[in-house]
Image: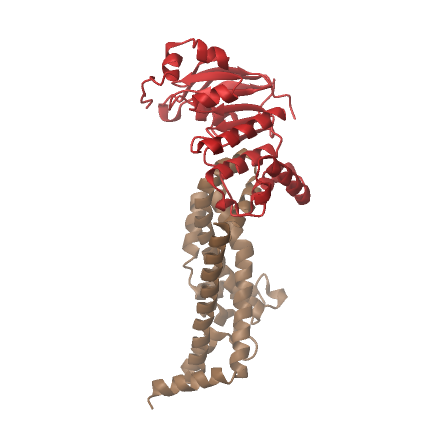
Amino acid sequence: MSLFATTFSEAFSLLATFDDRVAEIVALSLRVSGGAVLIGTLVGLPLGACLAIGNFPGKHAASVLMNGLMGAPSVVVGVVVYLLLSRSGPLGDYGLLYTPGAMVFAQSLLVIPLMAAIARQVIEDAWQRYAEELHVMRFSWWHSVTTLLYDCRHSLIVALLAGLGRAMSEVGAVMIVGGNIDRATRVMTTTIALETSKGDLPLAIALGIVLIVVILVLNAVAFAMRGWAMRRYG
Amino acid sequence: MSAMFPLRIRGLCFQPNGRRVLDGVDLELGGEGITLLLGPNGAGKSVLLRALCGLVEPSGGTIDWGGAGRPDFGVTMVFQHPMVLRASVLENVALALKPHGIARRERRRRAATVLARVGLGAREADSARHLSGGEKQRLALARAWVTAPRLLLLDEPTASLDPSATAEVERIVREIRTDGTRILMATHNLGQATRLGDDVVFMSAGRVREHAPVQRFFARPASDEARLFIQGELPWRMNF
């Protein structure tokens, strides 16, 4: 049997037997990325809505900056967070370096600009339709933000999926700030990188399959939710 | 809430990009009744309504609200194609009370009361986006009515409705008037003007040409322009 077939065969065995290592790594990955997307939702979506609705000096520059940060290299973000959280850094006293908390922090900085940029586009389209009536109803700037975020909630699922995809697939930042410590900060992507470099391909492939399946399942769920929402709310 | 009336508009101008959309509007409105804004396309009717609710900033002239500036609340507007959020009918109406600092439960209670008056009580829980055109217009009227406005501005609310939906909207407008709201309504429908209006303001080329009680306006229009408009013979002018 070829190496390709053998590797996949062993990978499926690991998945079929619910290997403890695999389960632990997957669980940590979901917690870290889920936490980052939660922060991205709480910070990024309102930030994008504010950029869409607001009228302030530097608005265009802020939008350009947000769009640019979408493509920030994850290793660069990792280095910046490392410097912040290291013992001699401004946040060193919190002892977050090489913990899942540091990984959540780093991934949040990656997903916030992405989710904000998508939210800005979605909300901007809605604002063009609703601005006059919200103005007539004397909605404050903040009331307009929350109302449009609520109205576009089903469209903003795209932002969540994009953020989750970015968080779950990145490896540079979490490798730097997490250290890829076994049973502590080892997630799917860092494990794939490590095991591949060691030549232990079955575990790497198994985790790769899990990663793809998780993303596909979440996309399918989001698709179904949007379909239901369109039928329910129009 | 300030007295707001009489509402005095003096020399109101609006000239975006040098085009005279409002060219010195003079108008005075008392605190009661339904006033119909008539005029050909491009006369400035919609822009005047927008200026009154603060959607456009006039380039000249004054609007005196009973001796004061425009009040924060008390003036609202219903558009020809109203906004409808992805929410229930009830939530779409209750939404209008959010800026008034009213608790959620009370907002929903008031919204339910008004929805019953506009004939949408049975549709409270339905998605607002599934309403017909006429029902959406009734929802928009309910959303304005629930705020108990002193002045309600209507921008051709029945322009895209069939006769039965139009009749229903007119019934609601009369009820809102009975509740004490002053109404200023732009329309192209001359029959509607005779059915609904107490007085008519006739505009053309950005100015008020005539302001008269409905019966006198239709029986003895003061200008040739108004006469031609009533007869459907007013030539369409390019205003830009």
Residue B15 image offset from top left, x and y in percent = 40, 23
Residue A102 image offset from top left, x and y in percent = 56, 67
Name the residue nearer the viewer: A27 or A101. Answer: A27
Horizontal side of residue A64 vs B139, given as left or right? left
Question: Where A22 falls versus A32 (above or below)?
Answer: below
Residue A181 image offset from top left, x and y in percent = 54, 77
Chain A rendering hue:
brown
**Residue at the far front in the pictured view:** B164
**Residue at the far bottom in the pictured view:** A1
Instruction: Tell me if I can see residue A55 in this picture.
Output: no
What residue sits 63% from the left and 26% below the top? B179
Chain B rendering hue:
red
Question: Where B157 falls versus B91 (above or below)?
Answer: above
Residue B159 image offset from top left, x and y in percent = 43, 30
Q: Give the mark count.
A: 0
Name the residue nearer the viewer: A92 or B7. Answer: B7
Instruction: Tell me if I can see residue A233 in this picture.
Output: yes
Horizontal side of residue B19 vs B57, given as left or right? left
Question: Where B176 falls versus A173 (above or below)?
Answer: above
Q: Which colour style is shown?
A: by chain
Can you tell which quarter of the image residue A100 is in?
bottom right
- Image quadrant where one finds the N terminus of chain B: top right
What residue sits 55% from the left and 33% below the top? B141
